[in-house]
Image: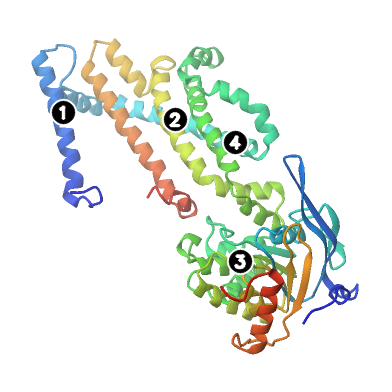
Amino acid sequence: MNSLAQPRAWERFFWPVVAAALLLAFWHYSVVWTATKVFPSPLSVEKGIAELAAKHVLWADIGDSLRRVAIGFGLAVVIGIPFGLWLGWSPAANQTVNPVIQLLRPISPIAWIPVAIIFFGVGDHAAIFLIFLGSLFPILVACVSGVSSVPPIFRNAGRNFGLSTPQLLARVVFPAALPQILIGARIALGIAWLVVVAAEMIAVDSGLGYLVIDSRNSGKRYDLVVAAMLIIGVIGLALDFCIRRLERIESVRWGFRNAS
Amino acid sequence: MLLTEASVLGTKSAAKLRAEHLGMVYDRDGESLPVLEDINLDVDDGEFVCLVGPSGCGKSTLLNAMAGFLSPTSGSVRIDGEVVTGPDPRRILVFQDRGVFPWLTVEGNIGFGLSKLSRAERTQRIAHYVKTVRLEGFENSYPSDLSGGMKQRLQVARALAVNPDILFLDEPFGALDSITRVIMRGELLRIWQTERRTIFFVTHDIDEAVQLADRVVVLSSRPAQIKDVLTIDMAHPRNISSNRYLELRDELLKQIGLAYEI
């Protein structure tokens, strides 16, 4: 089969299933052969997931994590997009603010945890602040580069139809930059999901991150630790799937020509 | 038929569009680069004028200055006696390609400049221009689903919908294949004859100019000056095999400095 041939329908499911099965088998026999007492086998993790699912606290933890991400990421979108559009539009503003942004951007949100706790105390607000920080920069950067790559033809056409600057930003620059902004938002949501787990290990006492650290601390339940990790992975995948659906909306699909 | 400078300028009050001693100098790495030099031109209301000239001579610069996107270094452009200071919905520039908004449907594009109208008026205006440019059935399509010719028709419809006095077209069919281009010329003439707008049309295609224009303005190479203005004294539809057509075309070729034989 050469690389241009379309894989058959059954092959597209069959090979990934084989790969996953091999990985599980490798995991299972590694646990068996090394006779480890600490690390759980796939079977005990599966039992762990069932145990967690039976307890109400898992659903509450998932709800808490998702709520924090929704608020922190939502704030980053609501504040980051207008701010990013303004920065992209005004070279003077960008030159003024860009050095600060570039300095803050490489600082991991994890490093902000102590500062967040000073500002907000231990609790929801600190976690939400960290998620907001982590999501803000990818959105800002995507907005600035999205705006600066809007073809001058679109801007000229907008001005030709008599639009004022705010109208031009809302009706031409924003929709023209939206595909790039969506890519930034997708990266931001991925980071938000990473940050919420880390923040919940330290700054709060609920959520999936807390579940991971609590399962270890209260009785070294590594089956529950790995179970919680897998749940985090599945939800992260689902979030990414959801935000990718936005790329199919007709008014942005033109910007994703090569992706689909 | 060649016109003298005096008759080109015409009488002062009649001109819809007038360029007076228009000059444009670009600043490139500290060196000044004259692009347009003392352009004087009058265009009458409802007239179809084509602008031709060698590649890179400043045709688009002149068009952009007339449409208000560039301010001239010297001289002025007047429309209805009023000095042009910026772009204005009363005169719309149609670009060569990629001018339509890809995030809007055909209807959304045509209605782009109509936000001040009531919903009923807007719907009616959009329907009228969908019909004018023959895009019925594509009202809810996005530009990515349209052919190049349809996109240009859409751009013309979006421009016409705001009821401009003047249409500036910057090589609007330059990116189309030659068959579509011929069809589009016919469409544009049909629209011009029913809508009666003043059209200022930049092209690098001599045949296009002779087929479409009432008058053809020939620019010299850079710094561009008006070399000649040729009146195309043929009624539409024009027979492109007639002697008069070939005479005019040869005259234009000569003006631009091209040989008759390849």
The three-letter code of the residue at mark 3 reads Pro
Q: Measured from the top left, where is residue A141 in percent x and y?
A: 54, 33
How much space separates mark 4 and mark 2, taking CA atoms? 20 Å
Q: Is residue A209 left or right of residue B207?
A: left
Residue at the disc numbered 3: B172
Q: Which of the 4 image quadrants contains residue A230?
A: top left
In three-dimensional space, the C-alpha distance between marks 4 and 3, rounded to whole angstroms, equals 34 Å
Name the amino acid, label 4: Gly
Q: Secondary structure at mark 1?
A: helix
| Location of residue A223 (image quadrant) | top left
**Camera-nearest label, 3 or 2:** 3
Amino acid type at mark 1? Leu
**Residue underneath mark 1:** A24
Distance from label 4 to label 1 (Cα)? 44 Å
Residue B195 visible in image: no
Single out the mark in the foreground, 4 or 3.
3
Q: Which residue extends farthest left?
A: A33
Spatial separation of the CA atoms under disc 2 and disc 1: 30 Å
Eye-nearest disc, 4 or 2: 4
Location of the N terminus of chain B by quadrant is bottom right
Tell me which chain the residue with mark 1 is part of.
A
Residue at which label 2 appears? A69
Q: Name the residue tied to disc 4.
A: A84
Nearer to us in this view, A61 or A241: A241
Q: Disc 3 sits on a residue from what chain?
A: B
